[in-house]
Amino acid sequence: MLRVEHLTKIYPNGTVALRDVSFEVPDGEFLVVIGLSGSGKSTLLRCINRLIEPTSGKIYWNDIDITSASPSEIRRIRRQIGMIFQQFNLVKRSSVLTNVLSGRLGYANPWLSLLGVWPVEDRQKALRALERVGIADKAYQRADTLSGGQQQRVGIARALMQDPRLLLADEPVASLDPVLAHSILQYLEQLNKEGVTVICSLHFLDLVHRYATRVIGLKDGVKVFEGLPDEIDRTR
Ligand code: ADP
Ligand code: ADP
C-alpha cells in the first residue's frame, strides 16, 4: 500500500509543481494519473521513487515514511519499486542485455556491474525478462538500433530485474504510436494481473478506460479528480 499525504513540491526556481496532493494506492491497483503536460505527473512519480525530494508532505510505502527514511532504507525501498520513462532512458551505446542488467541494484560489490561482469544467474534473469517482453533475440544489439516500442520493452525488462512490487510508469507510451502504445500497456496490465501494483501517467483519455482500475487527475499540480475510469465522463 502506498499513501501520499499533503504532498507539495516547489522547485528551486519557485515553480509549484504539486500542491497538497493526497491519495492512497492499495496493493494490486492499476492507477492512472492523467493531466496535461506540466500538470505535475512526472514530479509526483519522481517523488515516490525519491529521484527528487518533496518540499513538504509524506509518502508512506507499507507504513515506512519514504520522505524521512534513512539512506539504507531508501535503497531497500527502491528495490521494490521499478520505474519506466517516456524517453526510455537507456544507455544508447550499450547492448540491450547490459541495459537490462543495469536494473539489478544492490550488488555488495559495485565493481561487478561497473566492469560489466554479472553473475550468471543475473544474466539468465535478464534474458528471461527480455523473453517476457518478446525481444530476447535483440539481447546483443546496441540499444539505439531498436525501434521506440522495442526500447520501451527493454525499459520494462530492466524494471523487472528487481521483481518490483510497485511499477511507476511515467508517460510510457507518449512517444509511441497507438498500436505500440497498446502493446506496452498490455505488458503492464499483465504484470498488474500477476500482482504488481502499477502507477502510470498518461495524457490520452481513451487509453485510461481500457487499463485503469482507478484514476486521479492533476491540473496545475492540484488533484482535481479521483475515481473510477467511468466516472471521468460524468464529470467532464
Ligand atoms: P515531461 O512533460 O515529460 O515531464 P518536461 O519537458 O516537462 O517533460 O521535462 C523534461 C525535463 O526537464 C525534466 O527532467 C524536468 O525536470 C525538466 N524541466 C521541466 N521544466 C523545467 C523548468 N521549468 N526548469 C527546469 N527544468 C525543467
Ligand atoms: P508533467 O509530467 O505533468 O508534464 P512535470 O511534473 O514535468 O509535469 O512538471 C510540473 C511543473 O513543474 C511544470 O510547470 C514544469 O515546468 C515544472 N518543472 C518540472 N521539473 C522542473 C525542474 N527541474 N525545475 C523547475 N521546474 C520544473
Image (cartoon, rainbow, N blue to C red):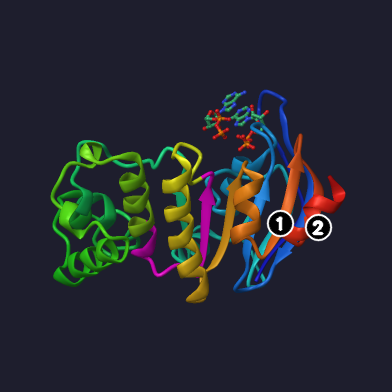
On the picture, is 128 further left or further right than 163?
A: left
Residue 216 appearing in the image: yes
Ligand 2 is found in which quarter of the picture?
A: top right
Q: Residue at the far front: name it.
A: 179
Cβ–Cβ under 8 Å for marks 2 and 1: yes
Task: State the image coordinates of residue 142 (x, y, percent, origin top left).
Answer: 18, 41
User: Which element is circle 2 on?
Assistant: helix
Residue plotted at (63% across, 48% down): 206
Tell me if I can see residue 68 in this picture: no
Circle 2 is placed at which residue position?
231
What range is drawn magenta here? 159-171
Q: Residue at horizontal 59%, vertical 41%?
A: 42
**Residue 192's spot in the image, x, y percent?**
52, 69
Q: Where, by quadrant of the figure, is residue 70 drawn?
A: bottom right
Residue type beneath disc 1? Val
- Element at label 1: strand
Q: Name the residue under label 1.
A: 215
x 22%, y 49%: residue: 96
Looking at the image, is 107 positioned above or below residue 35? below
Q: Is residue 166 magenta?
A: yes
Q: Residue furthest bottom?
A: 194
